Amino acid sequence: MGDAIIKRNPHPDFNKVEASRPELDAKSQFRYTKTVDADWTFGEGANKLAKDDGDKKHVTIDPHEEGRPAGFNYKLLISAIVPRPIAFVSSQAPDGTKKNLAPFSYFNMMSHDPPMFVVGFASGLANAKDTLRNVHDSGECVINIISEHFIEAANSASVNAPPDVSEWDISGLTPKYDCETVKCARVSEAIVSIECKLDMLKEFDSEARPGNKSGCMAVFEGTRFWVREDALNEDKNMVDPGVLKPVSRLGGITYARVTEAFEIPRTDFDKDVGGQEGVEKIQKQKN
């Protein structure tokens, strides 16, 4: 779906809008805060932020109702399923040509044993763009995680360039050909990169255009992890978010930073809830 149809950019003159905004606070450091309600107890439901929401109504939407463009579902979902991690995928054709670099926010981790990842593409194989074609033909790629220090370059790689134009050149990012299990390059500037082998591809039938394939899901297995030393702990099992400074996607053309977080311990049924007796106490308090 092209920008002319989707209209991701809501600003007729984006440069003017951006010029009116405050400078990004590059000095802000990742920090932890308390949770919204540190005194919350079992059975209380939503916290104090929801105190005025009781009378607010919901609207139901049939994604396939007559007259509703598929693009409306796209705009709605990318503004609702947020923040989304971004897979910055580097790939190449089996013969080493058609080297490609592109960001995808239809992305997430599915499993750790084995390490499995999913990336969604907005087309079927018949109309595959460079990344999907390369992945299909070569069976491999590198998923790089985007950080603040190269967000502009990463965004530029989403350009609708013809197949013979390399996003590596447009972005100015550095391909590093030292991967151990795949032939394509990782992004040298990325703090975290994952070498991947293709596990499966699944196409989706279009509801808006019957008989056509509108999307494709690629499932990958991670075969090597690359992490910059200053972001990795001694046990090699934790990445520091204050060093990684990951960038995520929201709706439209909006990206988000990670500058604040809070921790909430995972609940133990017997120790914290009090087992079945504790559940019964909670139920009595509600009645």
Image (cartoon, helix red, strand yellow):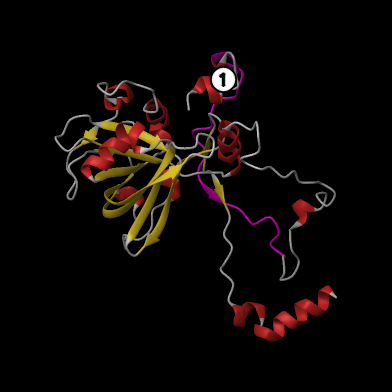
Residue at x 65% of width, y 84% of height: 275
Residue at x 26% of width, y 37% of height: 134
Q: Is residue 131 magenta?
A: no
Q: Is residue 20 magenta?
A: yes
- Per the rendered image, the range of residues in magenta is 15-39
Res 59 quadrant in image: top right
Horizontally, residue 229 falls left or right of residue 277, namely: left
Front residue of this view, candidates 45 and 75 = 75
Residue at x 67% of width, y 85% of height: 276
In this view, 243 is above or below 273: above
* Secondary structure beneath label 1: helix
- The residue beneath circle 1 is 18
In this view, 255 is above or below 58: above
Mark 1: few, some, or many residues within 10 Å (few <14, many ≥20)? few
- Residue 215 point in image, percent of width and height: 43, 40
Q: Residue furthest bottom?
A: 277
